[in-house]
Image (cartoon, rainbow, N blue to C red):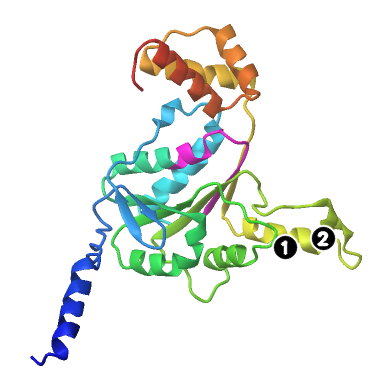
Amino acid sequence: MSQAADPLARIAAALERIAPAPADAVDWLSAPAYVWHGAARAVERLQAPPLGLLQGIDAQKGIVVGNVERLAQGHAAHDMLLWGSRGMGKSALLRAAVLAAQAADPGRIALIQVAPEALGSLAALFQELGRQPRSFLVFIDDLGFEDHDSAGPRVLRSWLEGGIEARPGNVRIAVTSNRRAIVPRHLSEQDDPINPRDSVDDRLALADRFGLSIGFHACSQDDYLAIIGGYCAAHGLQWKEDEALEWSKRRGARSGRVAWQFVTELAGRAGKAL
């Protein structure tokens, strides 16, 4: 090798040493869940509360569990929008439903959580999933678009319905949001002098593409106490109703999340892990 070429060879060798190793290919058949942020990462254990502990949302639970079971079995299933009050178990219910389907038929379905900023890479994800002999529920948590974001709703809307490239038959999408319309709605939208409904209808167009739109509403005092009672019975914890109500007053809300936080406090005082 000439002296001129030798420095180039040394530089090339040095670059090879510092370059990151190629990422291992993801096995889409082995894990119960995955995270997608433009690339996939397997999650070895899917954590969710037992379905029986998700109280105060019985009607919603029946719809979601039934739809996930159909998807796991390879039957026709809907995309789902779970919307409404914060802390009422929307995300927990999706995880629990998938976990229950996996227990009933191991290996048939997996949950994939997609970061909202990774919506633009759904095409690459769906291309990979469509080749797999398994069903997948693609989960986008706490979705909301800013006023200036028109690309995000269009990308998701196209995949749900109306795009020239359909998502694979073994894949369905589940979205949780605090708003049914997903995108903001303002009183100014009613000011269109030509057709005051056009703007509002466009805002709702994305939500209307979900086969199931399931509302979650703030729980009553009875539901809140029932949730706490269920958790405490499952974990062997003693509790007092007046203390539970005082906890919700200090938090300024009654919800499944606030109930779980109270249970966590009780477990900590009792020296127990949850």
Left or right of residue 147, residue 164 in this image: left
Q: Nearer the viewer, residue 27 or 36?
A: 36
**Residue on which disc 1 sits:** 202
Left or right of residue 59, residue 11 in this image: left
- Most distant residue in the right direction: 193
Q: What kind of residue is marked 1?
A: Asp
As displayed, is residue 121 above or below residue 93? below
Location of the C terminus by quadrant is top left
Residue drawn at the location 35% of the way across and 12% of the way down: 271
Q: Residue 170: x percent and y percent?
A: 38, 61
Q: Residue 197 got which mark?
A: 2
Classify residue 99 by image quadrant: top left
Query: Of marks 2 and 1, which one's residue comes earlier in the chain?
Result: 2
Say which element carries label 1. Answer: helix
Q: Residues within 10 Å of mark 1 (few under 14, many from 20)?
A: few
Q: Residues within 10 Å of mark 2 (few under 14, many from 20)?
A: some
Q: What kind of residue is marked 2?
A: Arg
Residue bounds of the magenta highlight: 78-94
**Can residue 213 be seen here?**
yes
Q: Residue 73: x percent and y percent?
A: 35, 52
Q: Residue 83: x percent and y percent?
A: 60, 44
Say which element carries label 2. Answer: loop
Left or right of residue 2, residue 202 in this image: right
Q: Residue 77 got which mark?
A: none
**Can residue 78 be seen here?**
no
In magenta stretch: residue 85: yes
Q: Residue 237: x percent and y percent?
A: 40, 11
As displayed, is residue 244 above or below residue 183? above
Residue drawn at the location 36% of the way across and 38% of the way down: 100
As displayed, is residue 24 above or below residue 82? below
Residue drawn at the location 36% of the way across and 37% of the way down: 47
In magenta stretch: residue 116: no
